[in-house]
């Protein structure tokens, strides 16, 4: 059996591995749903899947992956703000509301 995958397909498969890996790690309680890694892996995976669609465009897939990436960016921003606030408090500063 000779299988030839395009570069776009390989990138997309890697993206799927990242998204599914993040979900698996969440389910087995290796990462936190509001932590950095869950959002980061989901964002990275969805962007790779989105990139892979350039050779075989599919609007519904593009919409779900774009949404997944944007939601993950929101999670990363929330995580960053929480940690910046925590670091500011540890250094004796006043936390923002």
Image: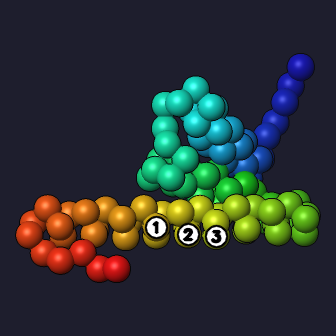
Q: Residue at x 46, y 67 (%)?
A: 78
Q: Nearer the viewer, mark 3 or mark 1?
A: 1
Residue name at image x 75 percent, y 61 percent: 65
Which residue bears the numbered disc 3? 70
Residue 70 in the figure: left or right of residue 34? right
Report whether 90 appears left or right of 18. left
Q: Which residue in the structure is indicated by mark 1? A: 78
Residue carrying label 2: 74
Alpha carbons under labels 3 and 1: distance apart: 12 Å
Q: Secondary structure at mark 3?
A: helix
Q: Residues within 10 Å of mark 2 (few under 14, many from 20)?
A: some
Residue at 9% across, 66% down: 91
Closer to the observer: label 2 or label 3? 2
- Left or right, residue 29 beside residue 50: left
Asked whether the beta carbons under mark 2 and mark 3 sit within 8 Å of each other, the answer is yes
Q: Is residue 90 left or right of residue 79?
A: left
Answer yes or no: do the residues labelled 3 and 1 have beta carbons within 8 Å? no
């Amino acid at each position: 059996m000779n299988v030839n995958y395009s570069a776009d397909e390989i990138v997309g498969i890697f993206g799927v591995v990242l998204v599914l890996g993040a979900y698996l790690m969440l389910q087995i309680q290796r990462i936190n749903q509001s932590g950095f890694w869950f959002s980061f892996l989901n964002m990275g995976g969805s962007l790779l899947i989105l990139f892979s669609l350039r050779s075989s465009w599919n609007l519904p897939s593009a919409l779900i992956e774009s949404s997944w990436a944007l939601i993950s960016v929101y999670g990363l921003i929330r995580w960053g703000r929480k940690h910046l606030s925590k670091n500011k408090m540890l250094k004796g500063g006043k936390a923002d509301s």
